[in-house]
Amino acid sequence: MKGAALGLLLLLGGAEAEEADPFRNLEFTLTRHTRDRYAADLDAIRRRGVLRVVTRNNSSAYFVARGRERGFEYELASSFARRLGVRVAFVVPDERSDLIGMLHAGLADMVAAGMTRTAARAEQVRFSEPLLDADRVVAVHPFLVKRIEKAADLAQLRIHTSFRSTTFRTAVRFGQSEGVDLDLVDLPSGIEMEEQLRMVEAGRFEAVIVDANILDLAQAAGVQANAAWSISPPLPKAWAFHPDAQALQAEADAFIQAGRRNGLLNIMYARYYQPHALGFRTAQDVAFRADADGALSPFDDLFRQGGELADIDWRLLAAVAYAESRFDPTVRSAWGAMGLMQVLPSTARRVGVGDPSTPWGSVRAGALYLRRLIDFFAEEGLPPRQQLRFALASYNAGLGHIIDARKLAPLIERDPNRWFNHVEDALELKRHRKWHERSKYGYARAGETIAYVSRVQAQYDVFVRHVPLEGDELEEEESQP
């Protein structure tokens, strides 16, 4: 169902819209929080418990490889969030030009994207202290026959750069100061510097302008491109904040200063910009770079098949598998759970799967079992978002413990039909003898289950950002959080 007819049904909440299975595409159901708009300073961020970071997909800032978020900016922003005592959520806009706009629109709390600190931008945002400095260079293919021996020789080159970028303004200032008439060609602002360098290598562009550290990273990865000329002094790269977020920016400055003293900045720079480092090698692992080719794992086809079998968004199955096994099909737990989805053989038999030790057997058993749990809570009359959260909690802890927790919830004035801040609080009671002796299924490892539901939700958020469903359709949004 497409277009206006679908939109009308969603607005009206009609019966026909409700007939579609809401678990085939959970993106609209589970990620509504990523579309909330509000401007927040430090106190409000701590109250909400989340730091929203807008960034860019590239090998230096943020990427997803084999299911895990990585990158220089990712590592530092995550460390900063831990200092604040909040979780972190990353958002990647379609265009680099949207970074500051998302701050102003209340869709993010900070920009962590290798942004150059300039006077013009400082009129729009608050900048942190620099994380690093990098000069800008004109990069060309190493076999370029034109000789570049002085600044005036750059006039021979057709230089591609986005006219909406600070790189373009750097080039214009350089041309004016050196008296060189540069031949500049516009390109879309969404093309990352590392992609521009690959276009130079492929012969599509004669020259581009990039940050010197990005060129170093690309050269170490084997990209054929050299610096022909530096056109700027080292420029500061910093985080950016909403103009009203003075306390948050001050806290970021303190974090960066501490990072210089304790070596964190140097460690992270070495991890992602030096070719011998683990982070660098992972960044070049494009076989499973979600932002490179849409692959979340080596088992995506199995998750898709499992999703079709159980009518569940396959990206959720991938998120469960990552939380359970880190995509390692050989893992076995001390309790006998096995494979990608960590299913017990007895549980697999209950859903008709004889051998959960193989990758497909594990995915099939996990998908069918999760579906069975979802259906149980559907019969309880819960809305889809809550059905799923209770099903995930049951997948981890066992259905009996969640039934117990729902019965305990009213005793502590919590809603038995909502997971976050309600039934999860009641489940926490089952760690204590006073309460678990009053419940049918006894003691529960509540902390593990509470963290598990949040971890799968967060991992699903990551996968959704990087891999859209074929023929995506919006699902009905619920009114309760």
Image (spheres, helix red, strand yellow):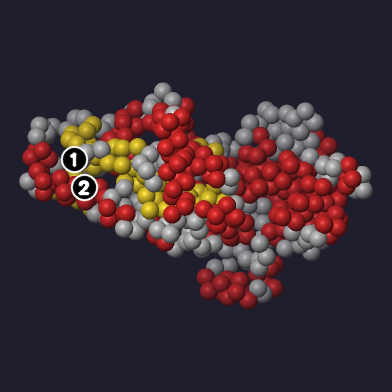
Labelled disc at residue 219: none
Residue in the image at 57% along x and 52% along y: 46
Q: Quadrant of residue 152?
A: top left
Give, as a three-letter code, the residue at label 1: Ile
Give the spatial CA distance, label 2 vs label 1: 7 Å
What kind of element bears circle 1?
A: loop
Residue tagged by mark 2?
170
Q: Total of numbered circles in the picture? A: 2
The one of 35 and 284 positioned closer to us in this rendering: 35
Residue tagged by mark 1?
231
The one of 118 and 138 positioned closer to us in this rendering: 118
Q: Is residue 9 above or below residue 306?
A: below
The one of 217 and 330 positioned closer to us in this rendering: 217
Determine contact: label 2, label 1, CB under 8 Å: yes
Residue 29: image location, x then y, percent: 62, 60
Residue 297: image location, x then y, percent: 56, 38
Q: Is residue 231 visible?
A: yes
Q: Is residue 55 above or below residue 15?
A: above
